[in-house]
Image (tube, rainbow, N blue to C red):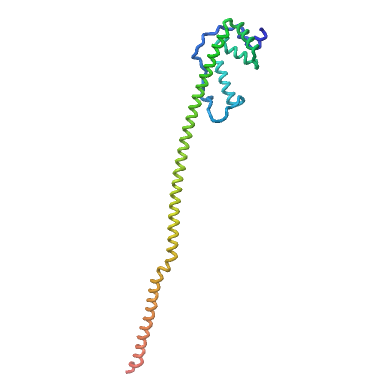
């Protein structure tokens, strides 16, 4: 029994203090920086750093609510420290517990176990609540950002549709004007022809009139000058 005691009990625990009355208000802190998150990804393995981190928080929390004296928590630490607890381990651990505190009974250990389990469940619930709050907050931010981006996309898409309609209108107008442009000469040709014919006629009339006038002028000079 002495060798068992030396292996699993600290020297300062050799003279155990009487376990104080348990205060069910005891709890260990739950901080936002360690709140676990829920996701659709596969459950993490025990080798995952996040799991190791939270496990350490649980262990530290159990240490923080462990009251003076010997109770289930010391029994738990003793059994777990063996690495491969079997029936004989439990028997020897209980015998050692009895040497440290005569009031220890299986019933008392089970009652204490329920206390620690309830605290673990309590902290777990707080972690879940905090994690879900953070997820909800992130989800709201995602929705807000998505809505903003979708609004920008919709506005840009609408503008593109408007620009495409304007582009089609411009292309149609260009096509129509090109058609008209090709017919401009043809459209004005009759007017131009009439004017040019009149201009030619004007030239011919001038020439004819001047020729006649010059003829008379010359004949005057020729036939009447000497009289």
Please tell me which residue lies in front, 199 or 153.
Answer: 153
Q: Is residue 182 above or below residue 199?
A: above
Q: Is residue 191 above or below residue 217?
A: above
* Residue placed furthest toward the bottom: 227
> What residue is rendered at 54% in x and 16% in y?
117
Location of residue 193 by image quarter? bottom left
* Residue placed furthest toward the left: 227
* Residue placed furthest toward the top: 102
User: Measured from the top left, where is residue 216 in percent x and y?
Assistant: 34, 88
Q: Quadrant of the C terminus?
A: bottom left
Tally the numbered discs: 0
* Residue placed furthest toward the right: 3
> What residue is rendered at 51% in x and 10% in y?
22
Please tell me which residue lies in front, 201 or 89.
Answer: 89
> What residue is rendered at 43% in x and 61% in y?
177
> What residue is rendered at 55% in x and 6% in y?
18
User: Measured from the top left, where is residue 121 in percent x and y?
Assistant: 52, 19
User: Measured from the top left, where is residue 169 in percent x and y?
Assistant: 43, 55
Please tell me which residue lies in front, 128 or 134.
Answer: 128
Q: Quadrant of the N terminus?
A: top right
* 108 sits left or right of 196 in the view: right
User: Measured from the top left, where is residue 127 in percent x and y?
Assistant: 51, 23
């Amino acid at each position: 029994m002495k060798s068992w005691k030396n292996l699993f009990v600290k020297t300062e625990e050799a003279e155990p203090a009487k376990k104080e009355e348990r205060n069910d208000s005891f709890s260990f802190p739950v901080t936002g920086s360690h709140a676990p998150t829920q996701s659709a990804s596969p459950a993490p393995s025990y080798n995952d750093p996040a799991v190791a981190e939270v496990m350490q928080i649980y262990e530290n929390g159990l240490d923080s609510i462990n009251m003076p004296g010997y109770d289930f928590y010391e029994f738990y630490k003793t059994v777990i420290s063996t690495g491969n607890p079997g029936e004989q381990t439990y028997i020897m651990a209980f015998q050692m517990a009895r040497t440290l505190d005569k009031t220890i009974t299986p019933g008392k250990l089970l009652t204490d176990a329920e206390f620690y389990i309830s605290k673990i469940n309590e902290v777990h619930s707080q972690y879940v609540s905090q994690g879900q709050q953070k997820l909800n907050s992130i989800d709201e931010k995602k929705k807000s950002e998505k809505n903003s981006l979708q609004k920008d996309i919709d506005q840009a898409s609408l503008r593109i549709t408007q620009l495409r309609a304007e582009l089609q209108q411009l292309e149609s107008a260009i096509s129509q004007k090109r058609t008209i442009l090709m017919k401009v000469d043809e459209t004005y040709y009759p007017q131009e022809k009439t004017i040019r014919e009149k201009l030619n006629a004007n030239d011919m009339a001038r020439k004819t009139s001047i020729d006649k006038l010059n003829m008379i002028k010359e004949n005057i000079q020729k036939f009447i000058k000497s009289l």
